[in-house]
Image: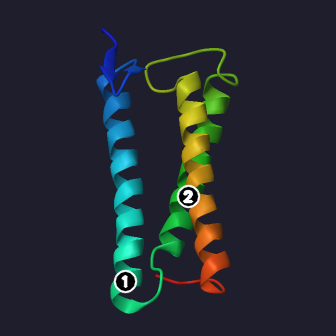
Amino acid sequence: MEPLEFWGITFRSASHLAYFKLSVTVFLASIGWCFGKSIFSGRFAPTRFWNIMGVAHSVVSLQAAVYTKMGQANDLVYSAECVWFNALAAFLYFFLYWLVCKFSGGSSRA
C-alpha cells in the first residue's frame, strides 16, 4: 500500500488519513459549537464533550503505545505516529476544558 499525503503529512494508509480528517473535523466543529453557543446563550457548551473526547484519545494513545511497544514497532492499525497524534489530541481537548472552566468561572456543562 502506497503512503498518502495530506496537508504535507504522510499517512501509512487510507484509514489513518480518514481518522485524522474525522478527528480534526470533530475538534474544529466542537470549538465552533462552543463559540456559537457562547454568543447566542452567553455560556460555553461542550466541556463535558471535551472531557469525553480527551479520555477517548488518551485510551487510544495508551493502547497504541502498548501495541507498538512505545512506537518501536508499526502495524496496519497502530503506529508511532498514532501514539503521538492521540496524545496531542487528548492534551488539546483537556486544555480546552481547562481554559473554558478557568475563564467561565467554573465547570460549564453541556
Q: Secondary structure at mark 1?
A: helix
Disc 1 target residue: 39
Residue type at tag 1 = Ile
Residue at the extreme bottom = 41
Relative to 38, is 98 on the left or the right?
Answer: right
Does label 2 or label 1 sit earlier along the sequence? 1
Tell me which residue sits at (54%, 36%) in the image: 85
Residue 93's label in the rendered image is: 2
Q: How many marks?
A: 2
Mark 2 and mark 1: span between their CA atoms?
21 Å
Quarter occupied by residue 40:
bottom left
Q: Does dot 2 land on a helix, a strand or a loop?
A: helix
The answer to which of 31 and 15 lies nearer the viewer is 31
Local crowd size for mark 2, using a 10 Å CA cut-off: few (<14), some (14–19), many (≥20) = many
Identify which residue is drawn at 39% across, 37% down.
20
Specify the farthest residue to the top. 2
